[in-house]
Image (cartoon, helix red, strand yellow):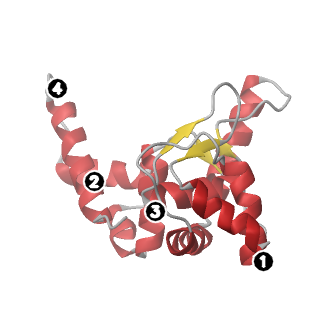
């Protein structure tokens, strides 16, 4: 998927500015809103966002659109602990995923070269089982969240699995996945 990531964040800042101006006596400036959007995306400033590499911005877009996506997949998972402990763990996993833009780009490019998309989500292609196939094919460990972020960034359709599951079901061809299995 080719996306103008800078345009995405500019449009987001403008939309948030319009919303902030509604009914406010002292609305923020566009520059202030751009700074806020950059901070929300994990950058120190708007300037840092503009100077980041494209792979990093692509992951920032994906994570902005999916606020529960993290290194483990979606959400805090069904692991033990209090809700506050689970939220803290998820926040840590989000920071870790945010630092993996190069890995996400590498997996994204591999998926685009090796797995055909389909129009609808395929109930037989889950992120966790696919990650194991991709790991074997690429010869390296891949976290579930890296695989999901790569698939989203590549433009494959997806659906979060229900409940506490961190996994996603993906819009990928069964034939392509079967070919991957046969190569192993």
Q: Sort mark 1 into few (<14), some (14-19) or many (20+) by Cα contacts within 10 Å.
A: few
Image x and y of residue 182, in percent = 75, 68
- Out of 176 and 108, give the one closest to the viewer: 176
Write down the residue under mark 3: 154
- Out of 135 and 77, give the one closest to the viewer: 135
Image x and y of residue 77, in percent = 74, 34
User: In the image, which disc is placed on residue 34?
Assistant: 2
Write down the residue under mark 1: 139
Element marked by disc 4 = loop
Precedes in sequence: disc 1 or disc 2: 2
Circle count? 4
The residue under the point 62% across, 71% down is 103
Q: Is residue 58 above or below residue 166?
A: below
Precedes in sequence: disc 3 or disc 4: 4
> Looking at the image, which residue sits at the far right?
80
User: Distance between the Cα atoms at labels 3 and 4?
Assistant: 39 Å
User: In the image, which disc is placed on residue 24?
Assistant: 4
User: Distance between the Cα atoms at labels 1 and 2?
Assistant: 40 Å
Disc number lying in front (1 or 2): 1
Element marked by disc 1 = loop
User: Distance between the Cα atoms at labels 4 and 2?
Assistant: 18 Å
The residue under the point 23% across, 61% down is 7
Disc number lying in front (3 or 4): 3
């Amino acid at each position: 998927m080719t996306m103008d990531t800078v345009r995405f964040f500019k449009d987001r800042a403008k939309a948030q500015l319009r919303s902030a101006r509604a009914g406010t006596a002292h609305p923020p400036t566009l520059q202030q809103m751009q700074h806020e959007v950059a901070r929300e995306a994990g950058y120190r400033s708007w300037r840092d966002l503009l100077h980041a590499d494209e792979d990093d911005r692509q992951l920032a877009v994906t994570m902005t659109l999916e606020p529960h996506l993290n290194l483990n997949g979606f959400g805090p998972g069904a692991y033990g602990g209090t809700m506050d402990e689970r939220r803290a763990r998820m926040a840590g996993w989000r920071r870790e995923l945010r630092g993996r833009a190069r890995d996400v780009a590498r997996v994204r490019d591999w998926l685009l070269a090796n797995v055909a998309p389909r129009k609808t989500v395929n109930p037989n292609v889950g992120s966790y089982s696919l990650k194991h196939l991709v790991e074997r094919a690429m010869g390296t460990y891949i976290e579930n969240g890296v695989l999901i972020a790569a698939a989203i960034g590549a433009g494959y359709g997806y659906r979060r699995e229900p409940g506490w599951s961190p996994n996603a079901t993906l819009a990928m061809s069964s034939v392509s996945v079967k070919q991957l299995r046969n190569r192993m």
